[in-house]
Amino acid sequence: MALDTSSIRLSLPYRHGPDSENTTMFPDPFLDMASLAMPRSLKNVLDMCEGIWLKNGTYRMAASRIVRYFITKIEFEDVDEDERNKLASFMNNRLRVVDQLSLVGDDYLAYGVSMSSVVLPFRRFLICRACRSEQPIEAARWQFKEWKFSAYCQRCRKWVQHAHLDRRSAEEDKICIKRWAPQEMRLLYHPYTQDHEIFWKIPQYICREIEKGTPFYVQYMPWEIIEAIKRKWMFKFDPGVIYYMREQTLAGVNTRGWGVSRLLSNFAQAWYCQVLKRYNEALALDYVVPFRVLTPAAKSKEGDPMLNMNLANFNSTVMRMLRKHRRDPASWNALPFPIQYQALGGEAKELATPDLLNQGMDEMLNAIGIPAELYRGTLQLQAMPTALRMFQQTWPQLVANFNGWLEWCVEIISTALNWDKPERVYLQPVTMADDIEQRQTWLQLAAANLVSKRTAFAPWGIDAADEQKRIFAEQKMFDEMQMDFSEDMAQRQMNQQQMAGQQPGAGAPMAPGGMPPMGAPVAPGAASAGMTPMDLMAQADQLAQQMLQMPYEARRKELINIKHSNETLHALVKSKLEDYRSEASSVGQQAVLQGQV
């Protein structure tokens, strides 16, 4: 299906009629040179926007900063924690969604439109028409001629015509984002419902490679596109395959569904800046280095030297002298006649117009919606809150398009990989990420349990649940290190006592019931003599409860003493302590998680 875009015209927002001659004697001020150079067709507009983006580095950097200013941390709502972490890791690390979103935003600001799609991987298999054996195309010897596959079949042991079969692949590392050049796209737009259908006019170089059967192009090209090339059709995308972003304009401008770049509305200013750049370039080429001239000096008494001098001899003598001077700057030179030196040009500094160029660039960027202070990095702190708020309200459609693009992208990827889809995906608001006073206020509200810790820590790039897990793991590591240190010190002390001829635990008094007093060593087997297992369990539980109230160092010493006296009692007490510690940790985790909801 062919689409004719030559009829799409972007007319000027003013008209010239014959009645203007009756109302004024002056020329129409809107009929300037920029109006004559203004593009009229859609293709010329896109080419113009692309040319200015590539040639004007100041505008390109300023627009890129606008895009990246609004790209903040991605939030996923109403999804399981494990699924959220898995999806966030894939989007940030594998897909590099921040970089892709930046490039999509660059297309949006440069062209006024952005078209992108998620490329899902597939694998192509070749099926022998004779024996129906199947082999992947990358492992086969094959050819593609006259729109048919022929390959060498291992079972038939000869070249046989093959059919093809494409299967969706689950390779996560092959998923990528494809950005489409708007010059290659065609749009069928309904003026009432505003529905649109997107077509791709396949470039000729791709068609030639497919027709020649180049393996690199045929192997990785979807078969629907190959069919379109074969029939010399444009390729039509299914609804939802391409995410279409466009810059809206006035309702009276008939763009047939296409977006209009802000450069078109400010074309006169962009044209003016380019004129200044062009003439400054001419000044740099012709007026920076002066043009040096040597001429015969005039003699007032003898008249004009041009009448009595051989000018050809004068010219050759002077040039020979200059060549000698360049070879040896310290050499002496002599001429049989006087000369005079004159420098022409060199007044580029007086003729250049840097102030005009800076003023024109500032006016163009400000008209587009880019504060000059932002791209120069000179925003004043006194006016920053108000200025940033006004600036953010200038680009609400950019943030809305970014959030819509993220939801569309996550939905496609979640469906393809069979993952749980979040209820909502969006960029963290810029005011939440950059307002320092609001950050501090949220931290205070989180301390008072009025907002969740996840919400309060999000502007700082901190995940509350992950940090709590790290705190528990760190505390556990410190406890283990302290236990190892205490055991090592106790072992050294016992070794020193043995070397001194003392027997640890000798003469230690016993408390009623066979339980040693706290802080006294126990002789081996003394605590369990004449006790049933139930009594021993009760004794271990009582000791564990007493030790929970003790400082850590004292608790470690008591455990060491019990271990030296009775291994069984030591194991029971240690097990009880672990049970109490696990129970306390579970209660603490539940309290933390309940405070984050």
Image (cartoon, rainbow, N blue to C red):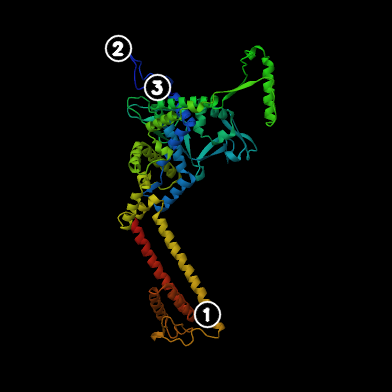
Mark 2 vs mark 3: give the one in front: 2
Residue nearest the viewer, comparing 220 with 179: 179
The quarter of the picture where the N terminus appears is top left
x and y, in percent, of residue 305 in the image: 64, 14
Relative image position of residue 323 (x, y in whole percent): 68, 26
Q: Earlier in the sequence, mark 2 or mark 3?
A: 3
Separation (CA) of disc 1 from disc 3: 96 Å
Please name whichever residue, 246 or 515, is drawn nearer the observer in this view of the structure.
246
Q: Which residue is mark 2?
A: 22
Nearer to me, 112 or 312: 312
Q: Residue at x 34, y 18 (%)?
A: 15
Q: CA distance from mark 1 to mark 2?
A: 117 Å
Residue at figure coordinates x 35%, y 25% from the top left: 253
Amino acid type, residue under disc 1 in the picture: Met
Q: Using the rendered view, name the quadrant where residue 33 is placed.
A: top left
**Callout 1 environment at 10 Å: few (<14), some (14 to 19), or many (20+)?**
some
- Classify residue 488 as left or right of residue 461: right
Q: CA distance from mark 2 to mark 3?
A: 29 Å
**Tag 3's secondary structure?**
loop
Amino acid type indicated by mark 3: Arg
Q: Residue 333's spot in the image, x, y percent?
A: 69, 26
- Which amino acid is tagged 2? Asn
Q: Is residue 370 above or below residue 552?
A: above
Tell me the residue that label 1 is attached to.
Answer: 494
